[in-house]
Image (cartoon, rainbow, N blue to C red):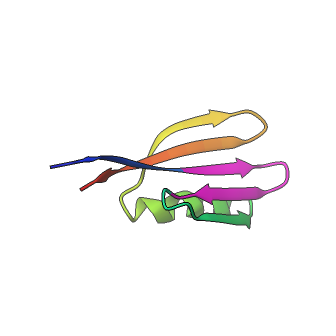
Amino acid sequence: MQRGWQYCTVEWLWDTGGIRCNMPDGSETRTGGSYAEIVDTLTNPGREGWKVAGCAAGGWLFWTLKRPIA
């Protein structure tokens, strides 16, 4: 039975190429890059069951990802 959801966030500041990922355990990674790197940044959590739950845009893109807690 599913107990709920875990959430993480990915932010991409495309003007500076900054990519930040925050995980539910409190860890944060910061990298840089353009389109190829942001695709990798979203693909890697996808291999672990994360799915995009929402996205917002301004001078950046901000994704919320979620996965079920088993």
Where residue 70 sits, quadrant-wise, is bottom left
Where residue 29 sits, quadrant-wise, is bottom right
Q: Relative to 10, is 45 above or below?
A: below
Report x, y in % for residue 20. 67, 57
Report x, y in % for residue 56. 62, 34
Q: Relative to 66, is 46 above or below?
A: below
Where residue 33 sits, quadrant-wise, is bottom right
14 left or right, relative to 24: right
Report x, y in % for residue 32. 75, 64
Q: Residue furthest front?
A: 26
Residue 20 inside the magenta-drawn segment: yes
Q: Relative to 28, is 65 above or below?
A: above
44 left or right, relative to 30: left
Q: Nearer the viewer, residue 67 or 59?
A: 67
Q: Tally the marks.
A: 0
Residue 17 inside the magenta-drawn segment: yes
> What are the residue bounds of the magenta stretch?
9-23
Q: Residue at x 14, y 49 (%)?
A: 1
Q: Nearer the viewer, residue 37 or 51?
A: 51
Report x, y in % for residue 21. 61, 58
Q: Residue at x 36, y 58 (%)?
A: 49
Q: Residue at x 48, y 56 (%)?
A: 24
Q: Main secondary structure of the magenta part?
A: strand
Q: Residue furthest right?
A: 16
